[in-house]
Image (tube, rainbow, N blue to C red):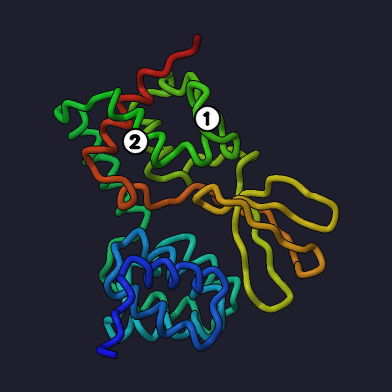
Amino acid sequence: QGEPVPMPYDLRLRIALEFAKSPTTAECPLIIDFIKTAKYATAIQLATGLAGDAFGADLLLASVKLGDAPARLLQEKAVLDRLKATKVNNLDARVKELTAGIPSAEKRLDDIIKKRALAFPKAKADAVKGKAVFAKNCAACHTLENVGAKVGPQLDGIGVRGLERLLEDTLDPNRNVDAAFRATKFDLLDGKTVIGLMLREEGAVYVVSDPTGKEIRLAKADVDKKTVILQSAMPSNVDSLVPEKDYYDLLRYLLTQKPK
């Protein structure tokens, strides 16, 4: 018979990401194992899922304390909001202890924005390549030049905002949140939390978009509380989701977009 063939890493990771959407107690340790090895952008997704479950939230905090998960995850707004919604005991004190000595999320983003503002003019960015970057990373939620979905704001003419504002809007989307595109937090009766952009209601169902643009359907009967929050539904970790060279190409493409 021979030894069983191990499941490929990418497939196991996809399974872990599915588990993270609504983890059970048995699945939480598996998710932690992948946080140890996954790239940071994926680790945020996994940690956000864990944070919406009481056992998973405690396991995440314990793992950070042991050094098995990066403490910076506790500064990510999506993760922190989930932890608060899960009502973790002594959360503020625990997060403060575990993130001591790490620059605040706001300072980290400020530093990234300043660094990229200086680097962009020297980057030899290509708008044609940037269009492909947009299609890959942004079109699931945004429309530009008749390409993409109308989930988030439409971006035709966005180049008039200029470099500084585009850096802010893409790297720190919570800084200037349009009221029409604030996220909604759904506290479910089973104790879990879902955060996303409210799209519409279909009878007894709320239809919500997650940060990747994927639609989630929530039965109204399963929702205990629905709250609009001062947070963008856009991911706040574009700096780790999009390679830096690709990001400069994307910026060049966006800056070429002027009102018709």
Relative to 192, is 120 on the left or the right? left
Which three-letter amino acid code belongs to the residue tagged 2? Val
Whether 202 is drawn above or below 75: the answer is: above
For label 2, the residue is 133
Q: Which of marks 2 and 1 is nearer the N terminus?
A: 2
Query: What percent of the width, then of the height, locates residue 71?
Result: 32, 72
Relative to 139, is 107 on the left or the right? left
For label 1, the residue is 143
Label 1 packing within 10 angstroms: few (<14), some (14-19), many (20+) = many
The answer to whether the residue labelled 2 contacts the one labelled 1, judged by CB atoms less than 8 Å apart, is no
Q: In which quarter of the image is residue 138?
A: top left
Whether 246 is drawn above or below 11: the answer is: above
Query: What percent of the width, then of the height, locates residue 250?
Result: 32, 32
Which three-letter amino acid code belongs to the residue tagged 1? Thr
Query: Can you name the residue that lies furthest to the top here?
Result: 260
Give me the residue at 55% from left, 29% from top. Answer: 154
Whether 174 is drawn above or below 223: the answer is: above
Depth order, front residue of 253/67: 253
Query: What percent of the width, then of the height, locates residue 159?
Result: 41, 21
Give me the residue at 30% from left, 72% from top. Answer: 70
Give me the residue at 40% from left, 69% from top. Answer: 74
Query: What percent of the width, then of the height, locates residue 102?
Result: 27, 67
Give me the residue at 69% from left, 68% from top. Answer: 187
SS of the residue at dot 2?
helix
